[in-house]
Image (cartoon, helix red, strand yellow):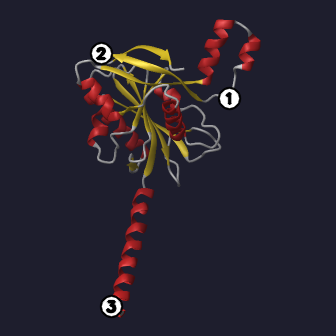
Amino acid sequence: MKRAVYFILIASLALIFYLDDCPTEIAEKTIVTAIGIDTEEDGYLVTMQIFKPEGSGSDTAVDPSLPNISILKGKGKTVKKAVEQCKSKLGGEMYIGKNRIIVFGKETDFKDIEKLTGYFLDDPECCYKVDCAAADGRAEKLLELPVLGGAVGSERFTQMIRSAKEKCRFRECTLDELYTAMKDGSKSIIMPMFGSCEQKTEKSGESTGGEENEEKLSPASEIILDRCSVFENGLFAYSFDST
């Protein structure tokens, strides 16, 4: 009986040590929560929304009320090179396993899908089922929008996608689905398209031409999801109202 008690005690201590050790290793890394990719003339710009419990090491704060959420940017001929520049600026290790979404700029060229997605598919920490979406403009600008209501930006993106799916407005697009679509013969992609309330207000103001209407449609700047984007042969073709 005593041996059984000792065995259980030792096993419990070993389990506690193991569980206590794992989070410590991840906690020492900067956690990536959202990634934006824009096509540049000489390659790609990668914008990362990062979370770090302690310390800084980032370029720009997203919201003063959320000091632990910051923006980090890197450029390179491939996405992998751009991510490496982000790591160099960070000066430490990053953990991509918590990334919730990859947002692609409207001008992104998907024809060379290996350069775009190769880094994520090769990284064992990255989930192949991570959500993918397009930005109505540049992904860089979308990830810089203020995060309101105490939510982490990446959570807001995924919550809006899930809500739209439940209402049967459109289906989500994941990283592995994006890769498969570009590898098959059709090379067509349909994915959610995020914009900003500012963009919608400007378009509404242009169509009506009234200052009074602009005041009514001018909420605090934040992300919106009311369109789907269609990419044909790797390039943006058109978008349509998902409602």
Q: Residue 220 has which mark?
A: 1
Residue 78 in sight in this render: no
| Closest to the observer, 170 or 21 | 170
Question: Which quadrant, please, contains the N terminus?
Answer: bottom left
Residue 185 in sight in this render: yes
Circle nearer the viewer, 2 or 3: 3
* Residue 13 to residue 27: above or below: below
- The residue type indicated by label 3 comes to Arg
Give residue 153's quadrant in the image.
top right
Q: Residue at x 42, y 53 (%)?
A: 29
Cα distance between the residues tagged 1 and 3: 65 Å
Give residue 38's quadrant in the image.
top left
Cα distance between the residues tagged 1 and 2: 36 Å
Q: Residue furthest right?
A: 212
Q: Contact, CB < 8 Å: mark 1 with mark 2?
A: no
Q: Is residue 15 left or right of residue 63?
A: left
- The residue type indicated by label 2 comes to Asn
Q: Secondary structure at mark 1?
A: loop
Cα distance between the residues tagged 2 and 3: 68 Å
Looking at marks 1 and 2 on the same chain, the residue that comes earlier in the sequence is marked by: 1
**Mark 2 sits on what residue?**
233
Q: Position of residue 223 (x, y in %)?
A: 57, 29
* Residue 48 to residue 92: above or below: above
Give residue 73's quadrant in the image.
top left
Q: Is residue 160 left or right of residue 90?
A: right
Circle nearer the viewer, 1 or 3: 3
